[in-house]
Amino acid sequence: MGSPAYVREAPEPEEAPPILSTGALAWVRANLFSSIGSTFVTIGCLALVAYLLPQLAAWATTRAVWSATDGTACRQHQDGACWAFVIAKWDYLRFGSYPVAERWRVDMAEAIGAGLIIWLLWVNAPRQVWGAFLFFVVYPILALILLRGSPWLGLPVVDTQLWGGIFVSLLTAVVGIALSLPLGVLLALGRRSPLPAVRVASVVFIEFVRGVPFITIL
């Protein structure tokens, strides 16, 4: 007589994977402590951060100059941030020499641009095609009219020599993104065009811009 046999009628419930094979700990182990060299680099970087972070926090807070009537206090305490200067010059840092009475136009241009960017970055946002059209086509024209001015719309003209500050950097970035993406797509399509003239023109433009230092173009 043979030994009795047992047949499992239901599978065992699945167990959770080992804690070191998935999740945050697995990522840390794979990317920060995957080898002896990686471990030493990680420990060195953590030690450097632990050494510099308290000094940076003190430079920005306890050793900083928060209020001053002139620059003497900042020159005497150069081991901390001079927030008094930043606060006093904040409007100039943001707007440059843009006329004070017209700075609302800068605020409006920035607010519209920020709203459109949020619309495009929102994954489940409705009608993103319209958002892309407004951002890449309508917004650059609207921002130029707002900032430059238009006598037809009753907006005084502000010469570009008066533009400056953070908003110019933001405007340059937005306009660059809005213009470079469609231009890049057109050039990519032109490079693969069966028409020799279009293909050669696209290749020459691409290789010229790619090969010449940007400072030379500027």
Image: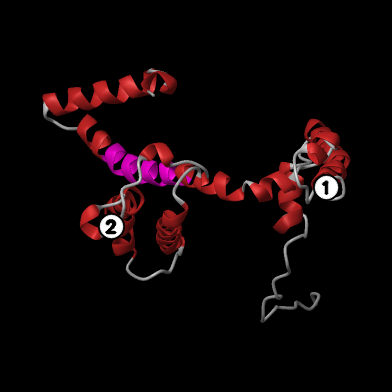
**Helix, strand or loop for disc 2:** helix
Alpha-carbon span between mark 1 and mark 2: 43 Å
Q: Magenta stretch containing residue 174, yes or no?
A: yes
Q: Determine if residue 106 is in view.
A: no
The range drawn in magenta is 170-185
Label 1: few (<14), some or many (≥20) within 10 Å? few
Q: Nearer the viewer, residue 54 or 17?
A: 54
Residue at figure coordinates x 67%, y 51% from the top left: 87
Q: Name the kind of residue labelled 2 in the image.
A: Phe
Query: Is 18 drawn above or below residue 52 in the view shown?
Result: below
**Helix, strand or loop for disc 1:** helix
Query: Is 165 drawn above or below residue 153 in the view shown?
Result: above
Q: Nearer the viewer, residue 150 or 192?
A: 150
Q: Which residue is mark 2?
A: 133
- Residue most extreme to the bottom: 9
Residue at figure coordinates x 67%, y 80% from the top left: 10
Q: Which residue is mark 1?
A: 57
Q: Name the kind of residue labelled 1 in the image.
A: Ala
Q: Magenta stretch containing residue 40, yes or no?
A: no
Residue 31 percent across, percent down from the top left: 71, 43
- In this image, 80 relative to 174: left or right? right
| Magenta-drawn stretch, dominant element (helix, strand or loop) | helix
Label 2: few (<14), some or many (≥20) within 10 Å? few
Residue at figure coordinates x 61%, y 49% from the top left: 90
